[in-house]
Image: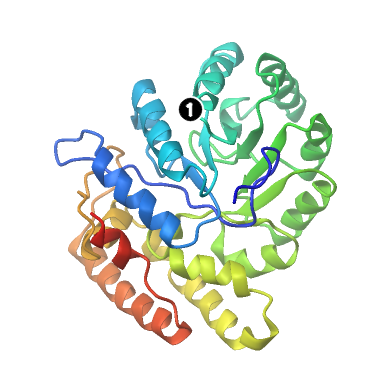
């Protein structure tokens, strides 16, 4: 069952891929299979129209169509959030926030680096967020410290100023700082607000500090392991297994970030998903060396999931394709 409209569930919220055909068109059939995969894996929610979705390379119509399809497929099962600020004046961004919210998402995500320039102060950022909120009354919002066009971090102090509005319910954290993550979590106490860490090296420490969950690119390659980790990170009976999975997260960081998201699509193709590896973003070449590295990683994933007693969710998703 869904939680109230003012909060998001705890657990794993994957940043969704957008599959394309070999000609570069959005592959809506492939998107349906991927959405089923995320749901079957046990995801607590879905983040559509994000950087992993190649949001900057989608047209406005595609952003709305992709998000609408995901919302309809996930309806009554898990909530969906989606990016609503993609450049322009605050008034222009507010208009798209309203359009994306009308698709039925539970919250609209704000790209922090599109609210203020890199050389502009936190005060300017707060003023513009207040303007955005005034132009989008009643719409639940979230933050994503997206690295493109640049990474603008939202400190605990900024959160403390904006959380009393009651409008912020989600924060995709990319600060890579365990101490600051704890400060941000503490700032959100007493509000319907959840911090979801994107940095898997700090997965266990963030969850133990009170993070609502994880929201990372690795979920496009091994979502089952991340869901398992969110459930068992504090399980006294599985300490050794949790430590082993955390070490796996650490060890696989380089390969999963190489030529991403193409390499994630390649991993899905190897699993039997009926999609293309076509990527609109310029993310570098998926070399034979990277393919071999991913092939090895998939074997490691299979072995680890067997050891933990995890049934691969991709088997059901592919079977339904």
Colour scheme: rainbow
| Left or right relative to 106: residue 58 | left
| Left or right relative to 272: residue 7 | right
Q: Nearer the viewer, residue 285 or 223?
A: 223
Residue 236, image x and y in percent?
70, 84
Image: 161 above or below 9: above
Residue bearing the label numbered 1 = 103
Q: Nearer the viewer, residue 155 or 221?
A: 221
Residue 283 visible to an observer of this rendering: no
Mark 1 nearby-residue class (10 Å; few <14, some 14–19, many ≥20): some
Residue at the image point whose x is 82% and y is 47% from the top: 187
Residue 273 visible to an observer of this rendering: yes
Residue at the image point whose x is 82% and y is 52% from the top: 186
Q: Quadrant of the C terminus?
A: bottom left
Residue 100, image x and y in percent?
50, 25
| Left or right relative to 312: residue 149 | right
Residue at the image point whose x is 66% and y is 31% from the top: 140
Residue 201, image x and y in percent?
57, 66
Q: Nearer the viewer, residue 286 or 142?
A: 142
Residue 154 is drawn in which quadrant? Answer: top right
Numbered disc total: 1
Image: 268 above or below 293: above
């Amino acid at each position: 069952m869904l939680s109230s409209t003012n909060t998001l569930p705890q657990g794993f919220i994957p940043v969704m891929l957008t599959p394309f055909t070999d000609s570069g068109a959005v592959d809506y059939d492939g998107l349906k299979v991927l959405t089923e995969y995320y749901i079957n894996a046990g995801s607590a929610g879905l983040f559509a129209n994000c950087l992993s979705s190649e949001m900057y390379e989608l047209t406005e119509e595609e952003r709305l169509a992709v998000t609408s399809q995901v919302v309809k497929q996930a309806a009554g099962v898990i909530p969906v959030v989606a990016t609503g600020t993609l450049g322009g004046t605050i008034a222009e961004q507010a208009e798209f926030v309203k359009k994306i919210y009308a698709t039925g998402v539970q919250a609209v995500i704000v790209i922090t680096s599109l609210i203020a320039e890199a050389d502009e102060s936190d005060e300017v950022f707060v003023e513009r967020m207040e303007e955005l909120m005034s132009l989008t009354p009643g719409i639940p919002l979230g933050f994503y410290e997206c690295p493109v066009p640049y990474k603008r971090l939202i400190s605990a102090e900024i959160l403390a100023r904006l959380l009393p509005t009651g409008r912020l319910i989600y924060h995709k954290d990319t600060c890579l700082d365990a101490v600051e993550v704890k400060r941000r979590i503490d700032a959100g106490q007493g509000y319907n607000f959840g911090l979801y860490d994107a940095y898997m090296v700090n997965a266990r420490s963030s969850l133990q500090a009170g993070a609502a969950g994880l929201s990372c690119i690795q979920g496009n390659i091994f979502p089952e392991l991340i869901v398992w980790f969110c459930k068992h990170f504090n399980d006294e009976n599985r300490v050794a297994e949790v430590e082993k999975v955390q070490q796996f997260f650490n060890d696989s960081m380089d390969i999963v970030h190489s030529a991403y998201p193409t390499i994630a699509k390649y991993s899905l193709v190897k699993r039997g998903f009926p999609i293309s590896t076509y990527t609109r973003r310029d993310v570098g070449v998926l070399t034979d060396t990277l393919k071999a590295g991913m092939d090895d990683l998939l074997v490691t994933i299979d072995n680890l999931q067997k050891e933990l007693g995890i049934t691969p969710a991709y088997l059901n998703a592919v079977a339904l394709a």
